Amino acid sequence: MDPNNRPLNGKGRGSFLLEMMKQKAQNERAQTMSHSVETPSVSSTDQTIRSIEQPSRSSEGYSSIASSSSSGGRGRAQLVSLLKSMSSSESDSREPTSLAMGHGRGSLSGLIKKLGKPSTSAQESIEKDSAGVLTKLADISVYDNPPVSDVQSSEDIAPICRQGKSGTKVETFANYIDLKIEPGKGLFQYEVKFSPEIDSVGLRRKLLNQHSATLGRTKTFDGAALYLPIKLSQEVSRYKSEHPMDGSQITLTIIYKKKQSMSENIQFFNVLFNRIMRALSLVRIGRQNFNPKCAHVLPQHRLEVWPGYVTAVNEYEGGLKLCLDAKHRVMRTETVRDLIKEIYHKAQYNYKDAVINEIVGTSVLTRYNNKTYRIDDIEWDKTPRYVFSKGDEKMSLIDYYKSHWNIEIQDQQQPLLVHRSKIRTATGEKEERVILLVPELSYAAGLTDNIRNNYNMMKDLSTVTKMSPDQRREVIRRFVEEVEKNEVTRELLSEWGLRMNSDIVQFTARCLDPEEIRFGNLKIHKSPDRPADWSSTAVKNPMLRTPNLTRWHIVYCTRDENCVTDFLKLLQQVSRSIKMQIQEPRRVSLKDDRTETYLREIQNSISNDIELVVVVFPTNRTDRYSAVKKLCCVQKAIPSQVIIAKTISKPPKLKSVTEKIALQINCKLGGALWTVSMPLKNSMICGIDVYHAGTGGGARKSVAGFIASLDAQLTKWHSRICMQASKQELVDMLQVCLTSAINAYHKYNGCNPDRIIIYRDGVGDGDLDYVENYEVKQLLATFNRIAPNYKPQLSVIVVQKRINTRLFIRQKARGGGFLDNPAPGTVVDSCITRRNYYDFFLVPQNVRQGTVTPTHYVVIHDSSNIETDHMQRLTYKLCHLYYNWPGTIRVPAPCQYAHKLVYLVGQNLLAEPHQALSDILFYL
């Protein structure tokens, strides 16, 4: 008997579970719909099943009964939890009854008796549905969805609207374009199956395109899901296609799934705009599209700058919008082979190391196919003569490029570049594939360290890449005009019933009042004209908390004696103005600058009573810096300050450099520079960031940093790090870090915090759900470990810096016809904020060149019920408290402290710092 034809009309637990879920869904539909604060609810059996795996977000935790199951399984435990939920929902309307709940089959049978037998109609529905639900596993599709009538459109669900009220209203523009959809236009989704099975997405497209006459030219196909603007005459259609390679027949089965409103399928729009970019002859590099025809050439540096765009369509509070921003890609006009040759002539002895440092980790463009590759390694032993198998024949790279691309490789002795890509196999597993590239045909793309360190080169690049608000708006307007002028792109949009607005969106934002900066001796600084900068005031006012420096050493090379003497003399003057007493240090002069010499003298000079070691290096060398920091931060527990001799050897700049060093030394000794008014009492503010080793880091571990405030003024911070598996973003040891922070808070204040607010940096949109369902759960579970009844209020806010949103305001000085950057403190919490998230944008800084980039904050968990105004104002206040910069920074101070800590540990220490340093800012 053919197993595929065997009927599966079972009546076991699976069938019963399905019936219970259906009955529960029907009961919920009969009642008034109540939605989660964060995620749109869907009243259907399918959504009930899916909610087991994808708990919906809410401000208090996990609101859906299904999501409260931590296991998220589909066995007896899940069935029992579901029955319990149904039992409790039924008992709400009756008098409460006492029922001892077990955990075995007895519990299951008891619940079944309590609920009663399923109705006859329900049993009939199972029998009717068995053909669709309980059929063979091979026919179950990932695209199966509930009937259209059961799905509630996102347009019917009210967006999450959390807006503040404080501040001055400002008319604001953003780099978003409204997308208008013709009424009545729909999106018909189909699933396409191939028999025999075809793995290649490109081949699937070719086979489907053979039926363009029937299906129409307007369609979007991603390899499995097909979207058409019309509905086909039959629910299931079958077509025969001819395999382009061997001429064999392939059967295509196109199955109708559902009709969606256009705004419900965001993926469709992004695929569509990728097609528009291709139609405009743009070259795709990563997720961005560039126009090589309009390249800005910088011949003096042998560089080209390609202008381009980055696009993303999403549904926001103000409707469906296209986010469009101007981007630039730096391309070299010389090949990688030219670079290797140049490096070889400069350093013949160790040129291979120099080549690896310069090239590995960068991206290259191969102009014959306009594709980019990341260089992961260099094969020095292989040349273009290397022979590989292509199908049944063997050929060298020289022959391959000649026959396929009509390119003759000139240098047959050059090494090969290695790109390792991960591809998914037919079984869904990831498999590494190695691609060998010829340096002669590869052009370096992007900025290397050498370019970044070249002042003149970066200055010339900035004239092209740093665009004013007016220039950005002009780029967006020109893009819309190009789409309208191009016949192919115009038809693409019109066939789907889409139209783009000709200009960027306009809405009302708010500008928060400037903060008062509080120094020692009750001195207050407030500047409405420059609210984001107090650099001159910071070195003229007494510090908030000043530990005096009496016993300290300065270690330097003999040749730097003069500049060290000048520095120490000026340090005494500066310390008087900031009311910090600094005694003369013990000088340790070295005959040479070898790392071993530095380590030996520092080791000998460190004693129990020493407060600080200042080390002056003649040159900037990472290995020497790492060795000294390891000694001072890991093996010993002594604050250290490293200075490069070059920075204190220029008399005109010596005063400003010395002032900054004095402020840093104060912080490393446990002092505090300034604060702002902080109304929150008995609260702990935390910051989390993760460091990943760059290319060449190998299996070096990632480092997660956790920073937590200990005092009400937010001037004292506790730090903790944990090592993770390489490239791992989600913090595994959060419980250890949070427990350590709460214990430190209790030790400092004599009580545990009532409210904990955590800012989590470095999380993209794709990881928001993981952070919420994984990290937040760890945080919540930590409180029971501290004390059984300890339940503080918790807020978790994700901080996103790498975004494409740009904000502009009208220039008042030039009659309002031109655009300018918004002032620091500008908050946007409407129109362009996410429809289903509690989020806002904040502009914390002032920029002198180009366009300011706001920071995006997403509140993924909030049981503290802080008012939206207070959350926004607190975030803005925290941007003032980073002691390495006398002004506002892009992210809250605890996030920047966490970043500095993990960078030091991941780049230099490679080990956990000494516990004695955990309550001071030793990592500044």
Image: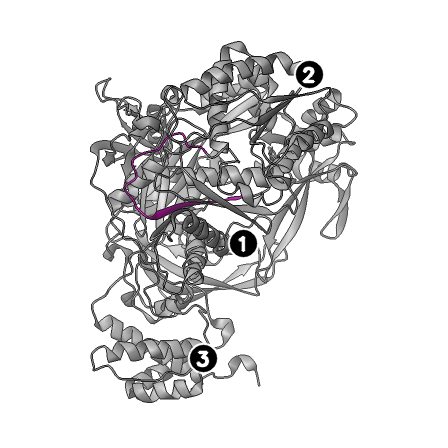
Q: Position of residue 198 (x, y in %)?
A: 57, 60
Cα gap from disc 2 to disc 1, whole angstroms: 67 Å
Give neighbour class at mark 3: few <14, some 14-19, many 20+ (Cα, 10 Å).
Answer: some
Q: Earlier in the sequence, mark 2 or mark 1?
A: 1
Q: Amino acid at mark 2?
A: Thr
Determine if residue 537 is in view: yes
From the image, state whether disc 2 or disc 1 is nearer to you.
2
The residue labelled by disc 1 is 201
Residue range (magenta): 671-691
**The disc label shown at residue 76, or none:** 3
Is 652 left, or right, of 578 in this rendering? right
SS at circle 3: helix
**The disc label shown at residue 558, or none:** 2
**The disc label shown at residue 253, or none:** none
Q: Earlier in the sequence, mark 3 or mark 2?
A: 3
Is 452 left, or right, of 466 in this rendering? right
